[in-house]
Image: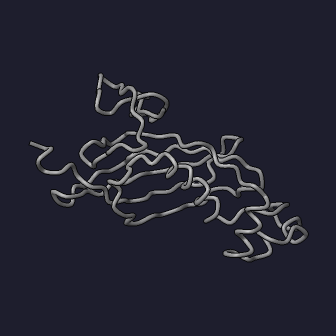
Amino acid sequence: MIGWNSLQSGLLWNEGADLHGWHGNWWTDYDPKGKTMYFDDLKIGMRTEPAPAVIHKDKMLAFARDYDNIPLHTDEAYAARTHFGQLIAPGVMSFMAVWAKYLEADFFGEELLAGKSTKIEWMKPVFAEDVLSAVAEITALTKRSPRNGIVEVSICARNQKGEVVLTNVTEAIVKCRPLQENL
């Protein structure tokens, strides 16, 4: 069970809360799978912590060979001679591993209409078998029309050492609650 919980500067999405049962800074018993989360239900500062993503070497190499085939990602002897000292994961693959865990929570459900934009910054290299943990936070909400709004989600991913390896800002279009429900 996943839910939102208060945390100093905002709301932390974690085990056990119900967005429709708001109590101060706490929500209890909310499970997003199969439920509706409209733009109108969202608040700036809401956070979620997706499950960690493990960068498995075999998947890292397969991705690199197919989509980012440079020696730094595919040739161990070459990578050992670089300042990294070993193979590094392709940046897009590292981001997608974290993003996949975020999507598994299915937070917006069918109310997510489309992605609008994304910006990724890579801060440190990611290596085979690194474990990436992330926090995703709603950082902006812009109502576009009575039918939908833009949600800006900022993600910060850290490796098992606590080092920030990547940040991301994504905008997504999410449905508003139908007008008859807003009355």
State the residue at coordinates (36%, 25%): 26
Left or right: where 176 falls relative to 125: left
Above/below status of 113 relative to 47: below
Which residue occupies the foreground of this view, 175 or 91? 175
**x and y percentages locating residue 129 in the rendered image:** 77, 51
Query: Is residue 30 rendered to the left or right of residue 89?
Result: left
- The number of callouts visible is 0
| In the image, farthest residue toward the left | 183
Residue under the image location 49 percent in, 52 percent down = 103
Q: Which of 107/72 is in front?
A: 107
| Image coords of residue 102 (percent x, y) | 51, 49
Q: Is residue 67 above or below residue 100?
A: below
Compared with 15, 168 (above or below) is: below
Residue ID at (91%, 69%): 77
Instruction: Check the image and tell me how it is coloured.
Output: one colour
The residue positioned 43% from the left and 33% from the top of the image is 3
- Residue furthest out toward the right: 77
Residue 145 % position (x, y): 17, 60
User: Is residue 2 toward the left or the right of residue 59 in the image?
Assistant: left
The single residue placed furthest to the top in the displayed view is 23
Q: Quadrant of the C terminus?
A: top left
| Location of residue 131 in the rendering, given as x and y in whole percent from the top left corner | 70, 46
Q: Would you place residue 181 above or below residue 80 in this image?
A: above
Q: Residue furthest front?
A: 34
